[in-house]
Image: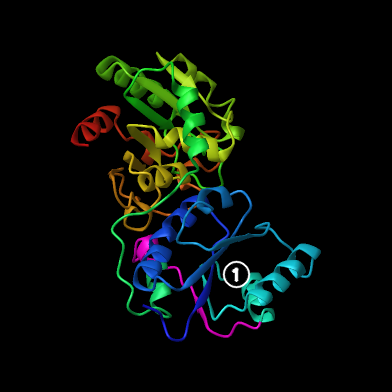
């Protein structure tokens, strides 16, 4: 089956990691309905390893997300895009700069993404594709494919540790968005209770810039601290072997759900109906009246030195344990 007007399409989403993972439902829906359509993807070099193995994509192009218009890199990209002769573009990152790239590449058939908090991100991206591919059906799950070598590396890293594997993704403390990270003290409580109850291994995951702030997590019994130790793709390989993932709203959480890892998402400021676990997971929401505020900065943290928003602080460790039981 072939869309008569579109033989070759370019999808653009430079980041963030979770957003790119969420777009997988769209390009797989297109490939399923129109298997002969060639789909290329433009993203960042950091994220490329996450999608390069996906057979739904014929090619992955890259550019620095902070690219400057008319730099050598951008001019070369425009030439490459022009050379590919795309029939259409699904621009899921419709900044002025990406719109200019599309225009200079002389691609006229364009569907630009419009963000709405009334829909989950996955459905929001899918609806953007509907404008060009009106027959595509919604996918029930996300998809992520890893090179076999990555899986083997992960097995080697974890070979001396006992299952079940619980990944605690504690990163994002220093991110621009507050209200998405769980307090270190509560992670320690949770990790030790998981160890006592299941006699497994606690795998600590997080951003490199948070490494010092997360050092107290080393006190968790039978834990392996991989925070800032692995390249992104190897960290994803470890997540793929996990039995469970517990995390605030983050790229690793959405990676886990795409890899069919049972996940618990902890939600404070972020709206679950927009970025909650799309599949393979259960979301826990704070009961504070201001939730979800979707603010970058928490109003309760102004003029304080506190790291954690009250909405995340109030999520009870026992609630997380009970939710894991449901999974």
Q: Which residues are magenta?
A: 106-124
Q: Residue at x 44, y 43 (%)?
A: 180
What is the count of numbered marks? 1
Quadrant containing the C terminus is: top left
- Out of 84 and 209, give the one closest to the viewer: 84
Residue 91 at x, y percent in the picture: 53, 71
Is 123 above or below relative to 315? below
Q: Which residue is drawn at the image coordinates 31% and 24% (left, top)?
A: 164
Q: Which residue is mark 1?
A: 95
Q: Position of residue 142 (x, y in %)?
A: 36, 54
Front residue of this view, candidates 36 and 320: 36
Which residue lies most toward the left here?
326
Q: Secondary structure at mark 1?
A: loop
Residue 95 x, y percent position in the rendering: 60, 70
Q: Quadrant of residue 130?
A: bottom left
Say few, some or many: other residues with alpha carbon within 10 Å of mark 1 (under 14 / 14 to 19 / 20 or more): few
Q: Position of residue 119 (x, y in %)?
A: 34, 65
Please name the predominant secondary structure of the magenta segment in the image: loop
Camera-side residue of 75 and 196? 75
Q: Does residue 200 appear anywhere in the picture? A: yes
């Amino acid at each position: 089956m072939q869309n008569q007007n579109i033989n070759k399409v370019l999808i653009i989403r430079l980041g963030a990691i979770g957003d790119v993972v969420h777009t997988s439902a769209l390009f797989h829906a297109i490939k399923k309905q129109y298997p002969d359509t060639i789909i290329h993807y433009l993203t960042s070099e950091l994220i490329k390893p996450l999608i390069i193995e996906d057979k739904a994509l014929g090619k992955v192009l890259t550019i620095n997300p902070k690219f400057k218009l008319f730099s050598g890199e951008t001019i070369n990209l425009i030439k490459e895009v022009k050379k590919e002769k795309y029939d259409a573009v699904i621009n899921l990152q419709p900044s002025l700069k990406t719109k200019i790239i599309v225009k200079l590449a002389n691609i006229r058939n364009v569907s630009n993404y419009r963000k709405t908090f009334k829909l989950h991100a996955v459905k929001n991206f899918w609806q953007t594709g509907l404008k060009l591919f009106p027959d595509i059906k919604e996918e029930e799950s996300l998809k992520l494919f890893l090179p076999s070598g990555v899986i083997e590396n992960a097995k080697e890293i974890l070979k001396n540790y006992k299952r079940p594997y619980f990944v605690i993704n504690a990163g994002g403390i220093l991110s621009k968005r507050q209200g998405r990270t769980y307090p270190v003290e509560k992670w320690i409580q949770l990790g030790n209770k998981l160890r006592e109850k299941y006699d497994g291994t606690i795998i600590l995951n997080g951003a490199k810039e948070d490494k010092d702030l997360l050092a107290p997590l080393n006190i968790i019994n039978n834990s392996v601290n991989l925070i800032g130790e692995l390249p992104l793709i190897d960290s994803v390989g470890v997540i793929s072997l996990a039995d469970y993932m517990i995390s605030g709203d983050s790229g690793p959480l959405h990676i886990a759900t795409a890899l069919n890892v049972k996940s618990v998402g902890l939600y404070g400021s972020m709206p679950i109906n927009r970025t909650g676990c799309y599949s393979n997971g259960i979301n826990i929401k704070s009961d504070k009246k201001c939730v979800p505020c979707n603010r970058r900065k928490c109003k309760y943290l102004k003029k304080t030195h506190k790291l954690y928003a009250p909405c995340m602080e109030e999520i009870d460790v026992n609630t997380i344990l009970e939710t894991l039981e449901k999974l």
